[in-house]
């Protein structure tokens, strides 16, 4: 049977297709629409999923939505009424939208599906709960027969954090913490206070934190957030106002820290760095606090995580280092896009009570998006008059790439196989370089990514050698770049953050065979099994999906080399631009 999971209408819309419980395809709508964090109905993503399986919507047995909109509407109403008259402008803006559109989610979903069936009959639509979708997305793809489950985000319908326990094909709830007490919104409030964009700039604050000292940690614990013995926490709502027109915090918030909010164009000072460090430290405390409660309630040796806060790889690293759990697995699409996966799996296993397939690589490395044939790529290259070299086999390509490009400190766009599902580039739509280069980080940040210089890059490292270079056990899985640990060497400046840390992607031959082959070729040539890896895009743009998008990014940035499957292009050989669009005009705040 076929199950189609959907998330949309808030942010990070996505579609996921299951066949008999196996993931066939998954993709975020932003990759097709080119609108970052696109919230619209995921028509393009659905079309891709159906095409990948060579079916139509008529073959789908059930469509499952990741959220229960009526419960979310209930929460919004109660929140506005409890805070009235504060937030009146926001209420008057939001309610007509909800009354006109959001309440009629089922109709909106049906209308979107009708367009894909030319008005013909379409499958029944089911609704999951937001945190159940997160929990299912974390547990079912994991390799654990049983595990504790922790979900932490901004807010779903009411829940902002929840704990569950999973066993075989069953998931059972333990407790939840409800809005407005939210670790995700707590973190986002400081994101906005530091002048970064809420709901996308949180990782900037995480990257800024190592430049500061947590001098405000005690002040925050004393005034803003209280932790209780049962594992719960509460925010002091005197300082927070999530329905305010002016921001997510009150005047008392700024007074507490003695400085006005930073504007996005303002200089980042030591104060801002210290605030970031303090907030990160408190966040780690709260995550560990919640995890201890879950451990006490379940006594499980394994933990799985999802929700937006689960993308905080520094907190994940601290939690793993604590030894509280033997193994920790994090859903690579932990945000709302992963909800599309979770709701489909929850329907299949909980509603239909189907048995679960437990596999080390159930999620297939998260390479679940579109791929392009050599014939398709060659047609695009020839159409736009690009000069290229086509290689007959992967080994010859990797030898050329290593010997004449990577070891020469060239910046390489690497476009291979199926696109990643989730926010991390894992070697399929990546920009790579020599991690030993002292200039590589600044080159990538300024000439390629067009972003702030303080933001770090991640290493990809062969699993066989990870213990030689990083404080990491070979048996611990980190295929999705979701844990931070300390580097053991000073010889990898391009991927080592100011505090000596690195956001680690451990490359397993069974999960990432193509990336493993390239790293092996680099190791053979240089005796170094590590490369720098960042997502194939520029600031404000989604990761590239198609060859033409990769070519545009290649031609309009300082990238030196581009690999599209078995085709290699060098910048200095090209005689014409692939587009007359000025890429710089597309840069947006991220």
Image (cartoon, rainbow, N blue to C red):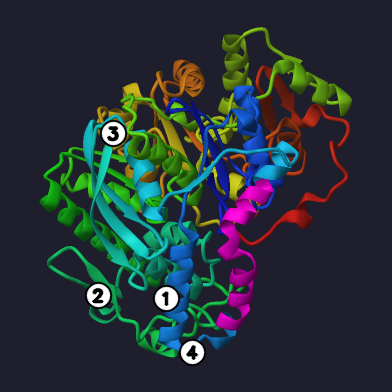
**Residue tagged by mark 4?**
86
Which one is in front in this view, the residue at disc 4 or the one at disc 1?
4
**Residue tagged by mark 3?**
169
Disc 4/disc 1 C-alpha distance (Å): 30 Å
Point 57% across, 81% down: residue? 90
Q: Taking the image as drawn, is residue 14 in sight?
A: yes
Disc 3/disc 1 C-alpha distance (Å): 48 Å
Q: Secondary structure at mark 2?
A: helix
On the rendered image, what quadrant is the C terminus found in?
Answer: bottom right
Residue 513: x %, y % from top left: 47, 19
Residue 58: x %, y % from top left: 63, 30
Q: Secondary structure at mark 1?
A: helix
The magenta region covers 91-112
Seen in the picture, residue 22 relative to 275 is either above or below; the reply is above
Which one is in front in this view, the residue at disc 4 or the one at disc 2?
4
| N-terminal label among 3 and 4 | 4
Disc 4/disc 2 C-alpha distance (Å): 26 Å
Please name whichever residue, 578 or 230, is drawn nearer the observer in this view of the structure: 230
Point 63% across, 33% down: residue? 57
Residue 551: x %, y % from top left: 75, 34
Residue 221's tag is: 2
Residue 271's tag is: 1
The answer to the question of whether label 2 and label 3 lie on touching residues, with beta carbons closer than 8 A, is: no
Residue 495 figure quarter: top left
The answer to the question of whether label 1 and label 2 lie on touching residues, with beta carbons closer than 8 A, is: no
């Amino acid at each position: 049977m076929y199950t189609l999971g959907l998330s949309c209408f808030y942010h990070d819309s996505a579609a996921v297709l299951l066949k008999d419980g196996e993931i066939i395809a998954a993709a975020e709508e932003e990759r097709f629409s080119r609108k970052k964090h696109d919230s619209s109905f995921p028509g393009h993503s659905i079309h891709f999923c159906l095409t990948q399986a060579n079916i139509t919507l008529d073959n789908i047995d059930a469509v499952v939505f990741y959220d229960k909109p009526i419960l979310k509407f209930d929460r919004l109403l109660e929140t506005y009424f409890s805070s009235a008259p504060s937030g009146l402008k926001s209420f008057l803006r939001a309610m007509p939208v909800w009354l006109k559109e959001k309440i009629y989610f089922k109709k909106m979903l049906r209308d979107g599906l009708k367009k894909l069936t030319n008005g013909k009959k379409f499958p029944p639509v089911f609704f999951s709960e937001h945190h159940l979708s997160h929990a299912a997305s974390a547990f079912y793809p994991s390799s654990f027969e049983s595990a504790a489950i922790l979900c932490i985000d901004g807010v779903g319908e009411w829940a902002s954090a929840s704990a569950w326990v999973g066993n075989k094909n069953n998931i059972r709830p333990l407790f939840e913490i409800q809005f407005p007490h939210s670790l995700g919104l707590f973190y986002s409030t400081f994101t906005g206070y530091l002048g970064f964009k809420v709901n996308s700039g949180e990782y900037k604050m995480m990257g800024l934190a190592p430049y500061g000292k947590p001098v405000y940690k005690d002040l925050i614990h004393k005034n803003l957030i209280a932790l209780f013995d049962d594992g719960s926490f509460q925010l002091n709502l005197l300082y927070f106002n999530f329905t305010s027109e002016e921001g997510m915090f009150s005047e008392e918030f700024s007074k507490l820290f003695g400085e006005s909010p930073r504007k996005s164009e303002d200089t980042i000072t030591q104060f801002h760095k210290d605030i970031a460090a303090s907030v990160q430290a408190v966040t780690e405390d709260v995550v560990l606090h919640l995890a201890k409660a879950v451990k006490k309630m379940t006594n499980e040796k394994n933990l799985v995580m999802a929700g937006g806060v689960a993308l905080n790889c520094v907190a994940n690293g601290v939690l793993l280092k604590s030894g509280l759990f033997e193994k920790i697995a994090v859903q690579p699409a932990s945000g709302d896009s992963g909800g599309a996966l979770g709701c489909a799996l929850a329907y299949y296993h909980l509603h239909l009570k189907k048995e679960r397939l437990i596999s080390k690589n159930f999620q297939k490395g998260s390479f679940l998006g579109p791929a392009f044939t050599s014939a398709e790529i060659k047609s695009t290259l020839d159409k736009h008059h690009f000069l290229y070299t086509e290689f007959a086999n992967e080994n010859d390509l990797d030898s050329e790439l290593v010997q004449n490009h990577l070891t020469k400190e060239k910046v390489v766009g690497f476009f291979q196989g199926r696109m990643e599902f989730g926010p991390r580039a894992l070697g399929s739509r990546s920009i790579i370089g020599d991690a030993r280069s002292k200039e590589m980080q600044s080159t990538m940040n300024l000439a390629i990514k067009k972003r702030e210089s303080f933001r770090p890059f991640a290493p990809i490292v062969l699993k066989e050698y990870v213990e030689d270079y990083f404080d990491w056990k070979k048996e611990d899985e980190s295929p999705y770049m979701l844990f931070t640990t300390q580097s053991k060497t000073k010889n990898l400046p391009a991927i080592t953050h100011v505090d000596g840390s690195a956001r680690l992607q451990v490359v397993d031959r069974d999960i990432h065979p193509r990336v493993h082959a390239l790293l092996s070729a680099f190791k053979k040539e240089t005796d170094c099994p590590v490369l720098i890896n960042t997502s194939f895009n520029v600031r404000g743009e989604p990761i590239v999906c198609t060859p033409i998008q990769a070519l545009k990014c290649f031609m309009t940035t300082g990238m030196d080399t581009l690999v599209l499957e078995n085709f290699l292009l060098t910048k200095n050989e090209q005689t014409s631009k692939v587009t007359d669009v000025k890429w710089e005009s597309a840069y947006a705040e991220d």
